[in-house]
Image (cartoon, rainbow, N blue to C red):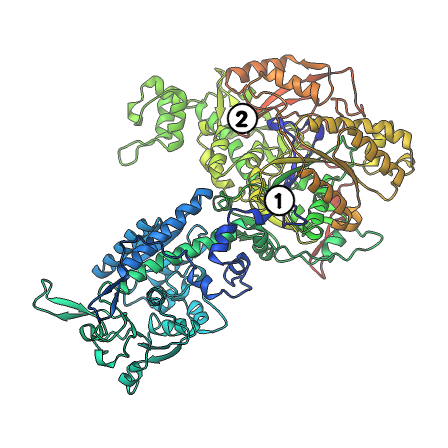
C-alpha cells in the first residue's frame, strides 16, 4: 500500500510520518510477491498455507470465485470429486465393523451408523489438522427452524449434536410457526450475505402457509449444503456440470455403495422412486459414476422384472416392503432409503420401523444390504457435516488466495499530446461501475454500499472476515519541502498505483484523503491527482463525495451548540434545578443515562441510582462550570471564509450576558475529522469522540464531550462516515478515499481503517516497508537559491532552463529528507516528478545525489503525461525496495516528557539547535501533564514551506531555535500539536477564486472548470 505525507517537514504524529495512502498487493510476477496500500507487497500465493487444503479437496480457487452468485463468479465446472468433497479416506479403527454377515450364505449388512460415525470423526480430524496452521478457520452452519413440531425438534437436536461431534459451529434461528414468508426470506438473505456462515439449512417440513420451493430457491447455491437448490439439482442432472453440493441423502447412498467395494462403473443400477430430494438426484449421481441406470416410479410397468436386472438397487418409494426378496438379482447391492412405521404389538411403542424392501427375504438373496433403521438415516447428517466442511474450505481458499480473489481489469488510456486539462481527461474516460471494482477486489455483496454508479462505502466489518490474512506491504508517499504549488504527491500516488495495477500485474490500492471544498473553490483546486494520473469521477471526488465532511460538520457544530447551551443553562439554575432537568422522574423514578454513569465514574462517585447522590455529589455531577476563556472548540464549515475567523456569539436579547468571542474553522480542521482518520473501528471512534476535550472548568479540570453527554450522539452522526469510500483511478485500479484532517494542525492523512482494509485485501506478507519521496527540479532549484514561486504567476525563467549548479545546491533539502526517513528504519525510493522543461542531465544529477544520500533508487516519473505507463520504472523500484530489509522504529520514546519529544523532533527532523517555549506553551505543558495527557505523541503544526519555522528560509537552514508559541491537545484523536508561528485554521478566498471557472454543461449535465 502506498501513503502520501501532506506536510513533510512536520509529519511526526505517532512518532512516524504523516501520510496519504496507497495500498497494493501483487499477483505473483517472476517469483515476486504482492504489494499493498500506503504501500504493501505480498508473498507468492503458491506458498500459502491453504494450498495443501486446496490440493486435498481438488478445488481450484478460480472455480470457487467464478460462481455466478459469488463476488467473482464461477468460470470452470467442478469435477465429481470436487462436488463430493473428496474428504480423506475413512480412517476406521480395526474393531469397527462396517459389514456384518447375517448368515454364512446371506447378505452382508452395510452398517450406516458405523460409516457415518467414521465420516463425522474424519470431518473433525480435517478441521483440527487445518486449524493447527490456520487457527481462525472454523466451519459454520446456520439451522433455521419454524415452529415446534416434535419430529423437527428431534431432527434439529440430532444435527446440533453431530455438529458438536464434528467440530462445526452452528447458529440456531428458531422462529415462530406464524413467521411470514417475507420474514423468513429476510433471515435467509442475511445469512446468504454473512461471509462467516458457510452453510444454511432450513428444517423441513415448513408450516402450510410457507412455500418450501420459494424458501429453497432463496438459499444461495454456494451455501446450499442440503443440495436442494434448483441450480445444484440442475447441475447434477447435466453430465457436463457438477453442483456446488450433492444432496446429502443421495451422497450418503453413494458412500454406502462405495463402502461395499463393488465397482459402480458399468453396472446396471435401478432407482425406485423419483422424488426431487432422493430418487432423481440418486439417478443422476449413479449416471455420473458411469452406471447404466433405470429410474422407476409408481407408474412403472413390470417393476419386478426391472428390479431383477439390478446389480445395484436404491429404493426410496415411501411404500413399506414394496420390493420383495424374490425380485432381487442374486448378489445385488441393496440400499433401502425408506422408513415406514407398521403396527407391531410385540414392540413397546406399538410400531416397528421397516424399509421399502422386504428385508427378511431380501437379505437371503442380496450380496450387500442396508438395514432399517441404521442404514441410510445416519449418513444423511454425516454428509451434511461433510458438505459444510467442503463449503468452509472453499470460502477459506477464496479468502486466502489473493491471486484468485483480485482480478482487476484495467481500463486502457487514450493518451493525447499536448496533455488536455484535468477535467477533460477525467470526463473522456468511462469508469467501471463501482460494483465491478468491489467484486474484483474480493468484497462480498453485503460488504459495500453503492453511492451512485461510481462510488461505494465499504463496511469495516470486512476486517473480521479477513482477520486471518496477513497484511500486504505498506508504502508511504511523502515529499521534500515543496513550493507553494506543491510537487505532485497525489499525482505520484495515483500514477504509482496505476503502474503497479495496470502494467506490472500487481494488486494495488491507493489510499488518499478526501479534499475539502474550501481549496476546491479557492486557489488550490481539487486533489484527485492530475493529468493522466487521476481518481475518477474527479468532480464527485472533489465535491461532496458521500457526505463524510458534512457529517463531520454536523457533529462538530452540534457539540459547539451544546457547549454554549450548557453554560447558558447552568448560569441560571440551582443544583437541584439542574439535577431535575438532567435526571427527570419518569413514572416516579429517576434513571442515569449510560453516558452519565461514565461521568460519575470519572468523578469517583460510585452510585447506581440518582436518588443515592448526596447534595455535594449532585453539585459535582450536574455542574461542568466551564471557563469560557478556555474553550478551544469552534464551529466549522467547509468553505473558505476569512470573515468567520473571529466572531461574537450570544448577542441576541434571549442570550443577554452570554456573549463571547469565538470563530469558525474549515470543517477538516475539526478534531472530529482527526478522530475519524485515526479510529480503529466504530467502538474506538465512540470512545475517542467522548474523550475530546473542549475546555477546562474553572477549577482546571478538562471538560470532555462525554461530560456534556454528547459522545453517543456524535457517533450516531458519524456512523456512516466511518466507512471508507471506494473509487478508482483513470486506469480502473482501486482507491480508498477516506477522511482528510487539516494538515496545518493535524496529521493530514487518510484513515487508519482504509489502510487496514487495503492491507488485508491486498495482503499476504507483513511489514512496514518503503518510504517513497517525491521531488521536482523546480522545488530543488528553489532550495538552491531560486527566486520565489508565487501561485497564479508565471514561473521565473530559471526554473524552465537547465541550471545544474543551482540544482545541486538545492538537493541538500532532498538529502536531508532522505536522512530523516532512514531514521525510521525504512528504505527510501525517490520519485522525480518530471516536467517538460526538465533535462536528462538534471534527472541524472538528482539520481546521483539521492543514491549517495542512501536512497534505494531515484527514478524519473512521467505519469502526469503517460499515466501508469510513465511510472512503471518507479513501480519496479518500489517492488525491489519492498524486498529489502527494514527495521521500523520510532523517533522518540512515547513516555518522554512533552518538551523532550518536541525538542527531539526539532533537532532530528528540522536541524534546529533546540526549542524556545513561550510562557503560554510552558503553561500548557504543565496543564497537560497534570491532566494526564503527557503520554500523547506529538504532531507539529508549522509551515510546510521550510524545514524551519520561517517559510522564507529554504534548503537546509541551520543555527536556529524553533519557537513554540502554544500547544493544543486533540485528546480524542490522541495527540498534542505545538503551534510554531501563526497557523490559520480558516483559509480565505483569493481575488480570483477557482469558482470563476466552474459551471455546468447543460447539454451533458457534466461539471466543467474543475482542476
Question: As rendered, which of 667 and 14 lies closer to the eye?
Answer: 14
Q: CA distance from mark 1 to mark 2?
A: 25 Å
The label number, if any, that marks residue 971 in the structure image:
2
Q: Secondary structure at mark 2?
A: loop
Q: Residues within 10 Å of mark 2 (few under 14, many from 20)?
A: many
Q: Is residue 859 above or below residue 313?
A: above
Residue 767 is situated, as x and y percent measured from the top left of the image, at 60, 36
Question: As rendered, which of 844 and 548 lies closer to the eye?
Answer: 844
Kindly indicate the quadrant of the structure image that contains residue 337: bottom left
Kindly indicate the quadrant of the structure image that contains residue 787: top right
Query: Which numbered mark, 1 or 2, is in the foreground of this view?
Result: 1
Q: Secondary structure at mark 1?
A: strand
Q: Is residue 6 above or below residue 142?
A: above
Q: Is residue 793 above or below residue 123?
A: above
* Residue sitting at the far left: 345
The disc, 1 or 2, on the residue closer to the chain's N-terminal end is 1
Residue 306 is situated, as x and y percent measured from the top left of the image, at 31, 83
User: Which residue, given by chain and number where applicable, does mark 1 sit on?
Assistant: 737
Left or right side of 658 for 265: left
Q: Is residue 177 visible?
A: no
User: What residue lies at 45% left-to-right and 53% top-to-bottom?
Assistant: 393
Q: Is residue 488 above or below residue 634?
A: below
Amino acid at each position: 500500500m502506498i501513503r502520501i505525507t501532506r506536510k513533510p517537514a512536520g509529519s511526526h504524529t505517532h512518532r512516524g510520518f504523516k501520510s496519504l495512502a496507497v495500498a497494493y498487493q501483487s499477483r505473483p510476477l517472476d517469483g515476486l510477491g504482492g504489494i499493498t496500500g500506503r504501500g504493501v507487497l505480498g508473498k507468492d500465493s503458491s506458498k500459502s498455507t491453504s494450498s495443501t487444503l486446496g490440493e486435498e479437496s481438488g478445488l481450484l480457487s478460480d472455480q470457487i470465485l467464478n460462481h455466478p452468485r459469488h463476488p467473482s463468479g464461477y468460470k470452470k465446472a467442478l469435477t465429481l470429486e470436487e462436488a463430493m468433497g473428496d474428504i480423506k479416506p475413512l480412517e476406521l479403527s480395526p474393531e469397527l465393523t462396517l459389514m456384518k454377515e447375517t448368515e454364512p450364505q446371506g447378505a452382508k449388512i452395510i452398517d450406516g451408523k458405523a460409516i457415518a460415525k467414521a465420516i463425522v470423526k474424519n470431518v473433525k480430524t480435517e478441521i483440527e489438522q487445518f486449524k493447527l496452521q490456520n487457527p481462525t478457520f472454523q466451519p459454520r452452519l446456520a439451522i433455521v427452524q419454524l415452529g415446534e413440531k416434535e419430529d423437527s425438534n428431534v431432527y434439529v437436536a440430532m444435527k446440533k449434536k453431530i455438529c458438536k461431534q464434528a467440530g462445526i459451529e452452528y447458529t440456531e434461528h428458531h422462529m415462530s410457526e406464524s413467521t411470514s414468508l417475507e420474514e423468513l426470506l429476510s433471515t435467509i438473505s442475511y445469512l446468504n450475505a454473512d461471509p462467516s456462515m458457510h452453510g444454511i439449512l432450513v428444517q423441513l417440513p415448513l408450516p402450510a402457509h410457507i412455500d418450501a420451493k420459494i424458501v429453497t430457491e432463496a438459499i444461495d447455491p454456494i451455501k446450499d449444503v442440503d443440495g436442494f437448490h434448483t441450480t445444484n439439482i440442475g447441475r447434477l442432472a447435466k453430465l457436463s456440470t457438477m453442483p456446488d453440493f450433492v444432496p446429502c441423502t443421495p451422497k450418503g447412498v453413494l458412500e454406502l455403495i462405495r463402502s461395499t467395494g463393488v465397482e459402480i462403473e458399468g453396472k446396471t443400477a435401478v432407482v425406485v422412486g423419483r422424488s426431487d430430494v432422493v430418487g432423481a438426484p440418486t439417478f443422476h449421481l449413479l449416471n455420473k459414476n458411469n452406471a447404466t441406470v433405470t429410474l422407476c416410479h409408481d407408474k412403472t410397468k413390470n417393476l419386478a422384472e426391472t428390479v431383477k436386472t439390478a446389480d445395484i438397487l436404491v429404493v426410496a418409494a415411501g411404500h413399506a416392503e414394496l420390493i420383495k426378496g424374490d425380485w432381487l438379482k442374486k448378489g445385488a447391492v441393496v440400499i433401502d432409503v425408506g422408513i415406514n412405521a407398521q403396527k407391531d404389538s410385540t414392540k413397546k411403542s406399538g410400531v416397528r420401523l421397516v424399509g421399502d424392501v422386504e428385508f427378511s427375504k431380501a437379505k437371503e438373496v442380496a450380496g450387500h444390504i442396508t438395514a432399517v433403521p441404521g442404514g441410510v438415516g445416519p449418513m444423511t447428517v454425516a454428509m451434511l457435516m461433510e458438505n459444510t466442511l467442503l463449503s468452509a474450505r472453499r470460502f477459506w481458499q477464496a479468502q486466502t488466495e489473493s491471486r484468485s480473489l483480485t482480478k482487476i481489469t484495467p481500463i486502457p488510456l487514450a493518451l493525447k499530446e499536448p496533455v488536455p486539462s484535468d477535467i477533460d481527461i477525467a470526463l473522456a474516460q468511462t469508469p467501471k461501475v463501482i460494483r465491478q471494482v468491489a467484486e474484483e477486489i474480493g468484497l462480498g455483496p453485503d460488504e459495500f454500499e453503492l453511492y451512485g454508479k461510481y462510488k461505494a462505502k465499504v463496511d469495516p466489518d470486512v476486517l473480521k472476515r479477513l482477520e486471518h490474512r496477513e497484511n500486504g506491504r505498506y508504502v508511504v508517499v511523502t515529499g521534500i519541502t515543496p513550493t507553494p504549488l506543491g510537487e505532485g504527491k497525489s499525482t505520484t500516488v495515483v500514477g504509482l498505483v496505476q503502474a503497479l495495477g495496470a502494467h506490472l500485474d500487481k494488486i494495488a490500492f491507493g489510499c488518499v484523503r478526501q479534499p475539502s471544498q474550501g481549496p476546491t473553490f479557492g486557489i488550490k483546486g481539487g486533489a484527485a491527482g492530475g493529468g493522466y494520473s487521476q481518481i475518477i469521477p474527479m468532480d464527485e471526488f472533489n465535491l461532496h463525495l458521500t457526505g463524510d465532511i458534512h457529517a463531520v460538520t454536523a457533529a462538530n457544530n452540534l457539540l459547539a451548540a451544546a457547549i454554549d447551551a450548557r453554560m447558558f443553562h447552568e448560569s441560571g439554575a440551582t443544583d437541584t434545578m439542574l439535577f431535575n432537568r438532567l435526571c427527570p422522574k419518569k413514572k416516579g423514578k429517576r434513571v442515569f443515562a449510560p453516558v452519565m454513569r461514565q461521568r460519575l465514574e470519572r468523578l469517583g462517585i460510585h452510585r447506581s441510582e440518582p436518588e443515592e447522590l448526596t447534595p455535594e455529589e449532585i453539585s459535582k455531577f450536574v455542574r461542568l462550570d466551564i471557563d469560557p476563556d478556555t474553550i478551544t472548540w469552534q464551529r466549522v464549515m467547509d468553505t473558505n471564509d476569512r470573515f468567520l475567523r473571529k466572531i461574537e456569539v450570544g448577542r441576541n436579547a434571549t442570550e443577554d450576558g452570554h456573549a463571547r468571542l469565538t470563530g469558525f474553522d474549515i470543517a477538516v480542521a475539526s478534531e472530529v475529522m482527526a478522530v475519524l482518520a485515526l479510529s480503529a473501528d466504530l467502538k474506538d471512534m465512540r470512545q475517542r469522540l467522548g474523550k475530546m476535550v473542549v475546555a477546562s472548568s474553572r477549577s482546571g479540570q478538562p471538560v470532555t464531550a462525554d461530560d456534556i453527554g454528547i459522545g453517543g450522539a456524535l457517533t450516531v452522526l458519524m456512523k456512516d462516515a466511518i466507512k471508507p469510500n471506494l473509487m478508482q483511478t483513470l486506469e480502473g485500479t482501486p482507491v480508498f478515499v477516506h477522511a482528510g484532517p487539516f494538515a496545518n494542525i493535524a496529521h493530514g492523512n487518510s484513515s487508519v481503517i482504509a489502510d487496514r482494509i487495503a492491507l488485508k485485501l491486498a495482503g499476504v506478507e507483513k511489514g512496514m516497508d518503503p518510504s517513497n519521496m517525491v521531488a521536482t527540479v523546480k522545488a530543488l532549484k528553489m532550495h538552491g537559491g531560486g527566486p520565489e514561486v508565487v501561485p497564479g504567476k508565471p514561473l521565473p525563467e530559471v526554473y524552465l532552463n537547465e541550471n545544474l549548479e543551482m540544482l545541486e545546491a538545492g538537493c541538500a533539502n532532498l538529502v536531508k529528507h532522505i536522512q530523516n526517513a532512514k531514521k525510521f528504519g525504512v528504505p527510501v525510493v525517490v520519485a522525480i516528478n518530471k516536467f517538460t522543461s526538465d533535462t536528462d542531465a538534471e534527472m541524472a544529477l538528482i539520481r546521483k545525489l539521492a543514491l549517495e544520500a542512501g536512497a534505494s533508487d531515484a527514478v524519473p516519473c512521467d505519469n502526469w503525461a503517460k499515466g501508469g505507463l510513465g511510472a512503471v520504472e518507479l513501480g519496479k523500484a518500489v517492488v525491489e525496495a519492498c524486498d529489502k530489509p527494514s527495521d521500523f522504529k520510532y523517533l522518540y520514546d512515547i513516555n518522554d516528557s512533552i518538551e523532550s519529544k518536541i525538542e527531539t523532533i526539532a533537532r532530528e527532523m528540522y536541524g534546529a539547535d533546540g526549542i524556545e517555549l513561550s510562557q503560554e506553551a510552558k503553561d500548557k505543558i504543565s496543564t497537560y501533564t497534570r491532566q494526564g495527557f503527557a503520554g500523547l505523541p506529538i504532531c507539529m503544526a508549522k509551515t510546510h514551506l521550510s524545514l524551519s519555522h520561517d517559510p522564507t528560509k529554504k534548503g537546509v537552514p541551520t543555527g536556529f531555535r524553533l519557537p513554540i508559541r502554544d500547544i493544543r491537545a486533540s485528546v480524542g484523536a490522541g495527540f498534542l500539536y505545538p503551534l510554531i508561528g501563526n497557523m490559520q485554521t480558516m483559509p480565505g478566498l483569493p481575488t480570483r477564486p477557482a469558482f470563476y471557472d466552474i459551471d455546468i454543461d447543460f447539454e451533458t449535465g457534466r461539471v466543467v472548470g474543475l482542476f
